[in-house]
Amino acid sequence: MNEIQSVGSQERHRRYLEIEPDAAAMYSVIARVERDQRKADVFRKLGDAGMGHARLWAEKLGLDPDGLVPASVGCKLRLFQFVSFVLGTSRVVPWLIRSEFRKLRIYASDPEAGGDSLTRGEAMLES
């Protein structure tokens, strides 16, 4: 791999590493307010999958993956949690799906991001 490709890969991996903990935090917030335990478990699994992906990108960047945690719950996530609680998670899931499809499009253009190790739907299918 030449130096230009290496720098490009590192930038992509950093971007992915920023995306996944945010997604994990979002799923965690939804799991906390979901009243249906089965659905809450699915959201928790999706959050765990996101953190698994973050660990993969951290390793590719030469970072310690054990120190990774989901993003902190800031104002945006607290508002999202409140809306999920008041309206129900079924009202916010379509928004999440659109968000996930945007991420999948980014991943789809990168051969390193493909394959079974990054299939976000795997956790949903297990439930």
Image (spheres, helix red, strand yellow):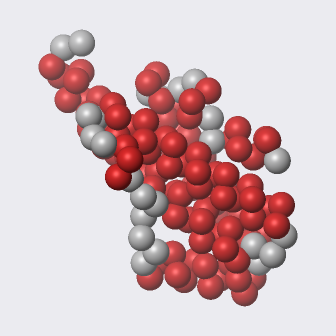
Q: Is residue 19 left or right of residue 47?
A: left
Residue 15, x across and y down, in percent: 34, 45
Q: Nearer the viewer, residue 15 or 52?
A: 52
* Residue under the point 61% across and 62% down: 27
* Residue under the point 58% across and 51% down: 48
Residue 47, x across and y down, in percent: 59, 55
Using the rendered image of the protein, determine whether residue 35 is visible from the camera's viewpoint: yes
* Residue under the point 52% across and 57% down: 23
Residue furthest out toward the front: 66
Q: Quadrant of residue 33?
A: bottom right
Q: Nearer the viewer, residue 7 or 20?
A: 20
Q: Is residue 107 left or right of residue 8?
A: right
Decide: is 32 above or below 110. below
Decide: is 22 above or below 15. below
Q: How many marks?
A: 0
Q: Is residue 83 left or right of residue 125?
A: left
Residue furthest out toward the top: 1
* Residue under the point 42% across and 70% down: 72
Residue 44, x across and y down, in percent: 66, 58
Decide: is 81 above or below 42. below
Q: Quadrant of residue 58?
A: top left
Q: Nearer the viewer, residue 106 or 122?
A: 122
Decide: is 122 above or below 30. above
Residue 71, x across and y down, in percent: 42, 64
Using the rendered image of the protein, determine whether residue 98 is visible from the camera's viewpoint: no
Q: Is residue 79 left or right of residue 70?
A: right
